[in-house]
Image (cartoon, rainbow, N blue to C red):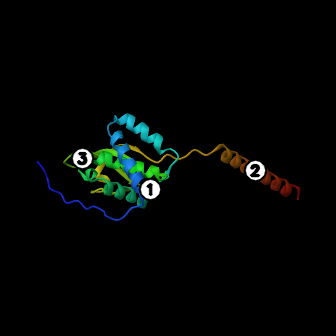
Amino acid sequence: MSVTVALNRDHRPRPWKLRLQTRLAICLARILALFKPYVLRRVLTRLSKGAAAADAAEVTTARDSVLASSLGLHGLRACLPRSLATALLCRLRGTWPTWCVGVRTAPPFAAHAWVEAGPEMIGETGGYDSYSRLFTVPPATPLPSRTRDQDQRQAKKQAQEQTQEQVKKQTQD
């Protein structure tokens, strides 16, 4: 059975750097889509480290760029490479959305992959409760550096010393 679908293609000019990053993300996404789920999750978790959380505007821009660069990713069964390409493009630009894999909760039941920015599903039909998540790869929070930890300890120690000095002055008076 085939279905005729009219696709909206964005013909706005895009900077060459964005087009190059988008093509690279699409190529990598098509390769990653062949991986087993546990390997894919591990790879994406490593890729998400060190990236800031993406906001809805950044993820929407990345998704629009991916869809403008590849008509094949508009299809109903192209959700996995489309979501991977969107997440990878965001990562190339320094951010990371929440990448999700799950199933629809209402008939017809089917597997699906999508990206989220905070609580918002980007470019998906249906509500937030329309899908049940099997696993997600959220933005990894970077660990504080040692110098920041040392600075925090030093500031805490100074605050304690000042408090002790104030208590001594109050008891002497």
In the image, what residue occupies the spot 81% across and 56% down?
A: 166
The amino acid at mark 1 is Lys
- Disc 2 is placed on an element classified as helix
User: Residue 29 location in percent, x, y?
Assistant: 36, 44
SS of the residue at dot 3? loop
- Residue 103 on image: x %, y %: 28, 45
Q: Considering the numbered disc 1 on the image, is that residue within a helix, a strand or a loop?
A: helix
- Which tag, 2 or 1, sits closer to the chain's start? 1
Q: Nearer the viewer, mark 2 or mark 3?
A: 3
Which residue position holds label 1?
17
**Residue at which label 3 appears:** 77
Residue drawn at x 28%, y 51% is 73
Q: Earlier in the sequence, mark 2 or mark 3?
A: 3
Mark 2 vs mark 1, foreground winner is: 1
Q: Is residue 22 above or below residue 12?
A: above
Q: Which mark is residue 83?
A: none
Where is residue 40 shown, x and y percent of the image?
A: 38, 38
- Relative placement, left or right, of 117 versus 154 is left
**What's the distance in space between the residues labelled 1 and 3, CA to CA?**
28 Å
Q: Mark 1 or mark 3: which is in front?
A: 1
Q: Position of residue 146 (x, y in %)?
A: 66, 43
* Local crowd size for mark 1, using a 10 Å CA cut-off: few (<14), some (14–19), many (≥20): few
> In the shown orientation, is residue 7 left or right of residue 93?
left
Which amino acid does the dot numbered 3 rest on?
Answer: Arg
Farthest front residue in view: 16
Q: Nearer the viewer, residue 20 or 152?
A: 20
Find the distance from the CA under tag 2 to the CA under tag 1. Answer: 52 Å
What count of labels does the image hold?
Answer: 3
- The 10 Å Cα crowd at callout 2, few under 14, some 14 to 19, many 20 or more, is few
